[in-house]
Amino acid sequence: MDFIFLSETFLNLLSGVPLTLNLALVSTAFGALLAVLLTLMRLSSWRPVGWVAQFYVFVFRGTPLLVQMFVIYYGLGQFRPTLQAWGLWVFFREPYWCAIFALSLNTAAYGSEILRGGLQAVPHREVEAARASGMWGFLLYRRIIFPIAIRQALPAYGSEIILMVKATSLASVITMLEVTGLAAKLISQSYRAVEVFVVAGLIYLALNFAITRLVALIEWWLSPHLRPAPTVSTGAALHHA
């Protein structure tokens, strides 16, 4: 094992971390907004709207992300004159925006199902108790439904964020030089695939470990009722008495 080569590889791949995080965070943010819209459509009482959202989720969950990225980046290029006429070619000619677009559409399908499950997991008795206390409309959602639904959905959504970090590696197939793209470039130059991919894997492992800790911290912050009660010593209790 050549540790000098490993250290040089680590420094080279580290330069791709900002792009990896940028792709993951931006696509997750856009995907979350679209996921909320899809969730509202799925829960709508107007069936055609729910069918559209259900078809969207079926398509993007049932096809590989790699295929979706190829279709958006390479496939839409066949319609360049039409896209130019609509003013969209400026967007779709850039691999960065194509990667963001594909990742956002994909994570929105999974995110909408996570959010829908969180909303449906809210206990009905708590909703009824809030209504009996005079809470209706947006106040009911803001104080009761949304906080409980977010706590229910957060662990699964944290896993989706981790999957998105790993999914950014597919952006390398459309010329993006994030961590995996740089790794592929180094392998083509050095022909040392094992060492390069070991370093790349450790970088992804470190990133996802940080994300899991952050999600756990948010979950702890949103669940004060699950924290252990502070212990009070007998001497302090007698003193206050």
Image: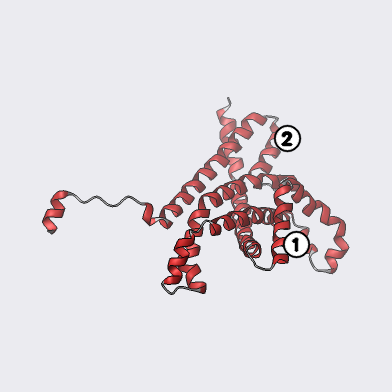
The residue at which mark 1 appears reads as 91
| Left or right of 177, for residue 81 | right
Nearer the N terminus, badge 1 or badge 2? Answer: 1
Q: CA distance from mark 1 to mark 2?
A: 30 Å
Bin the neighbour count of mark 2 within 10 Å (Cα to Cα): few under 14, some 14-19, many 20 and up.
Answer: few
Query: Quarter holding the C terminus?
Result: bottom left
> Up-down: is 68 above or below 40?
above
Name the residue at 55% across, 49% down.
156
The answer to whether residue 175 is visible is no
**What amino acid type is highlighted by mark number 2?**
Ser
State the residue in front, 178 or 167.
167
Query: Quarter holding the N terminus?
Result: top right
The answer to whether residue 116 is visible is yes
Residue 160, horizontal then vertical, whole percent: 59, 49
State the residue in front, 186 or 215.
215
The residue at which mark 2 appears reads as 188
Name the residue at 68% across, 53% down.
106
**What amino acid type is highlighted by mark number 1?**
Phe
Bin the neighbour count of mark 1 within 10 Å (Cα to Cα): few under 14, some 14-19, many 20 and up.
Answer: some
Q: Describe the element under mark 1 as helix, strand or loop.
A: helix
